[in-house]
Image (cartoon, grey):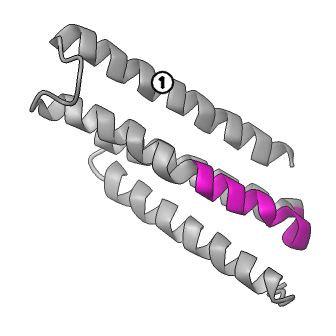
Amino acid sequence: MTVFFVCAGLLGLLAVGLTMHVGRLRGRKKIFLGDGGDPEMLSAIRAHANLVELTPLCLFIIWLLHGPYGNATIAVLAAILTMARFLHAGGMLGFYKFGRAAGATATTAILAVAAILLILAGLDIRLY
């Protein structure tokens, strides 16, 4: 469970960092609503929004898997999700050329795997 909590905390800090980045850009560029047609502002907003759109659902589904699958499964899923979200944010902000695609793909895969495992657990089917 410790890994899950650490990963959830790191993702929370990523949200804080992305929020602050958007705020700094808004002040520097004097864009106080929307993206003002500025590509850098749009990327910052979307990096933050994408994290907020997907991460809570992923974490919640992963958390629900604790009962049927235990600590090891949720630790692995949470760790991969955390790496994926940092990659995605880094890619959106221009730090990693491949980060956006790799992060988005990994996040979607984690969401799909966790959702399927949860459905199977609901049907009392365990894969391991």
Q: Is 55 rendered above or below residue 49?
A: below
Height in image: 71 above or below 88? below
Image quarter of residue 30:
top left
Where is residue 5? Give x, y as percent: 78, 41
- Residue at 49 percent across and 43 percent down: it is 52
Secondary structure, magenta segment, majority class? helix
SS under mark 1: helix
The quarter in which the C terminus is drawn is: bottom right
Q: Quadrant of residue 64?
A: bottom right
Q: Amino acid at mark 1?
A: Gly
Which quadrant of the structure image shows residue 63? bottom right
- Against 32, residue 65 (above or below) is below
Q: Quick check: is 13 in the magenta stretch? A: no
Q: Residue at x 51, y 53 (%)?
A: 54
Residue reaching furthest to the front: 33
Residue furthest to the left in view is 37
> Residue at 83% of width from left, 90% of height from top?
125
Which range of residues does the magenta coloring cover? 56-70
Q: Report x, y in % for residue 61.
A: 69, 62
Residue 40: horizontal and vertical position, in percent? 19, 30
Report the number of discs: 1
Q: Residue 24: give x, y in percent of width and height.
A: 32, 13
The image shows residue 15, relative to residue 74, as above or below, that is: above
Q: Magenta stretch: residue 61 in it?
A: yes
- Residue 94 visible to the viewer: no
According to the picture, the residue beneath numbered tag 1 turns out to be 17
Say whether residue 46 is left or right of residue 108: left
